[in-house]
Amino acid sequence: MESAPKAAARAAEASPFARAPLRGGGQLANLGILALLPLALLLFNDYWAFTSAQSVFIDPWRYTGYFLHLKAQLLAFPSSYASDRFSDSLPGWFIYQAFGPWVGNYVFKAVVIYTASFATYFAASRLFHPRVALIAGLLVGAQPYYLIAFGWDYVDGICVAYFSLSLLFAFRAAWSNSWRLSLFLAGFFGACAMSAHFLWLNLGGTVLVAYFGAQRGSSRHSVWKSLCALFMGALTAVILFCLVYHYFTGNWFYLANSLRHTLNNGLGAARKVNAALVPTTSPAIWLAPYTGLIPVACWWIFRRDTQRSERLCLILAVTAYATAWVWQAVGFPFVILWYYSSFLFPLYALGVAAVLNRPVRALSDRAYIVAVAGCVAAGAVLFGGVPIWDWLHDRLRSAPAGPAILREGSLPVFALICLLAALPVCFRPLKHLSLGTFAAGLFLVYGLQLIALPEQGWFSGRESFTNKQAFRLILDADAWIGRFRPDRRLLWWLDGREPKQGLMAGVTGLYLRGYSMLNQELPKLSSKDVELLDGPRRMVLVVSSKPDSVVRAREALSGAGISVRTERTATIANGPLALSLALFDTKPMSLLPGFAVAREGLQEVPGVLSLDQFQPVLASVQRSGSVTISAVAPAWAYLAYAPLRLPAGETWVRVTARVRKGQVGFGILNVKETDFHVRKFLDEDEDSQDVLLPISHPEDSVKLIIQNGSVGGRLSEVIVENIGLFARPKQ
């Protein structure tokens, strides 16, 4: 008959949520071990902790721009969905302000990756055992694509951190006396992840599955009270960000652009992106560890002796993996972009912990120490030997079958290695060897992934400069530009044929690139470019690695009839890098009073429009020969209007005005008052300027609107000196 101590030990082992918490010192030691690899990369690698400038990828630099200049970015780019991702930009901005952008970059990367890794560790240690949590964390934390998610400024890294916290508090609520607070925090951090990127809605339901699945039979909480606590946490996050967003911009709903982008573009736009990407990224080597684990996970889910905690984590991992492929099947590029696949990491880490639960618990103390030391050493060899992987990459590319191994055949080959390495976990006689084979297989695949990565510039580079040098230069360039254009309103101009385009993508990406682009064909200017310089962004930023580009740009502007009122130039250098920058404060000839009228050969139609027709809306109006309109009003608010009764035929409304404060728009409103037929903005200027508005639909043009273009509670003031209706002289 079995003794009482042995029976108790067996019962504890069979308990669905058996765990042996370590004392404080033991937990700190485990966290310190988990922190080693990211800390080494922060200190000794000049690539990982900086958004890569080795290749042209714009998106992460957008968020660096918000970290540097949150309020100015929000006001300069109010229609961008990047402005809505407040749960990412706000903590990044706070850290940059507290530590400065150079140190702040290191602090931000460390805070985000350690939050994600430690939250996953604590969740796994509660479900299984701290030893299991540590080894699973070391195996997942050394995966190159896991580290990539935290080494740049895109939103996937911080979303992994938020989602890991949400899962941790959901599990904690299942057995905690303070379950309401834990669920509140789970909802809060879940909302942070989902509002930073709507794709996280795909995994939002797994938080509920984790919570309800983890509850013990004796401690089940009310379903409705639980849902209410989760909802209140999520609502609190949304309200908090709305309040801060209103403080910065004067607007309340910080997700408006993301919703508009999703509803207007939706799956159709995603399918177009997917169709373009599939031929080049179909291998998706970042999916190999997930793919190799899934068959083993499915095997353990249906075994009778699988513990409830193991089965729950495996179900979560398989569900997340399956939903990613479902989205891919309907046309969304969920699995062929590594920064979307990284969403799987928190649940994948729990799946790894579930698979390794029994092999790790079967280890003796000495074997466990050897296993931990082996994982740490393997990570050090992987990322300390990056030059070796670069050398192998070059040799493999020159081999006959090398490119195929790195690309077309990579996913099935890499996934097969992971599967074969994980298979021993399924067999009891091999359980003492299963951990070693599983870890060896994963690290082998990690090495192969590193061999395929050099051109990306994540851990090494193919250019003559490091990401660290590029980041410093980009910060210096941005600081120089900000001295003269703190409101971020400009149009950048460069030559897309020059080398080092990744570097220039960093500078222009800080200005949301597509929202502030003149063109990439310096020194060419099209008619559309000249029209663009007629708008509110008339400060032109020239970015080039060639000093003579500044001269060519100035000549091109002059040839297009655009005068340069002021010019500022600088050469920004760091190590082997140097960029020539020029800021041109331009003024199109068309804005000079009378120029556009004379160019078009127009004559005034008398008795139709006059200054005394202007009526105030949200502004004070003073009349003394000219009309002065001033107000502190919300962005895009109507300040004043003049009714229009226009004759048939081709006509133009001409307004001569001087903007003394802020930015002011002039537009022709339709009958339903829902849209402008035409609208132009003028910036603050000491000189008078002309606005010539063509009337394309006289029967549907009812009002000339003067609109506020300033945001953030700034004063707008304009002196309207003249107004008139013009037409071509009759032949």
Image (cartoon, rainbow, N blue to C red):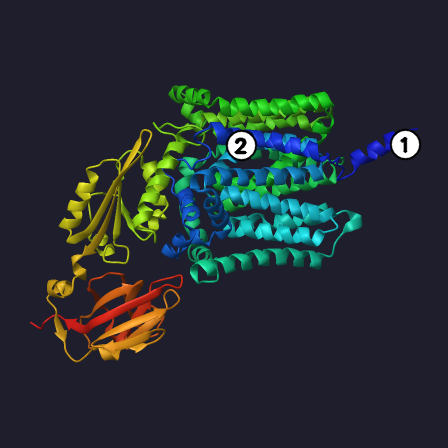
Tell me which amino acid carries mark 2.
Pro
Q: Quadrant of residue 530?
A: bottom left
SS class, disc 2: helix
Extreme-right residue of the structure: 1
- The residue shown at (25%, 49%) is 540
Whole-percent x and y of residue 606?
14, 78
- The image quarter containing residue 366 is top right
- Left or right: 458 in relation to 627: right
Q: CA distance from mark 2 to mark 1?
A: 45 Å
Residue at the image position 23 percent from the left and 68 percent from the top: 696
Q: Nearer the viewer, residue 355 or 91?
A: 91
Numbered badge on residue 38: 2
Looking at the picture, which amino acid does disc 1 mark? Ala
The residue tagged 1 is: 4
> Which numbered tag is attached to residue 680?
none
Sort mark 1 into few (<14), some (14-19) or many (20+) by Cα contacts within 10 Å: few
Name which residue lies at 25% across and 71% down: 697
Contact (CB < 8 A) between labels 2 and 1?
no
Task: Please say if 726 is above or below 580.
Answer: below
Task: Look at the numbered disc 1 and give the secondary structure of its residue.
Answer: helix
In the rendered image, the vertical position of residue 516 relative to residue 641, given as above or below: above
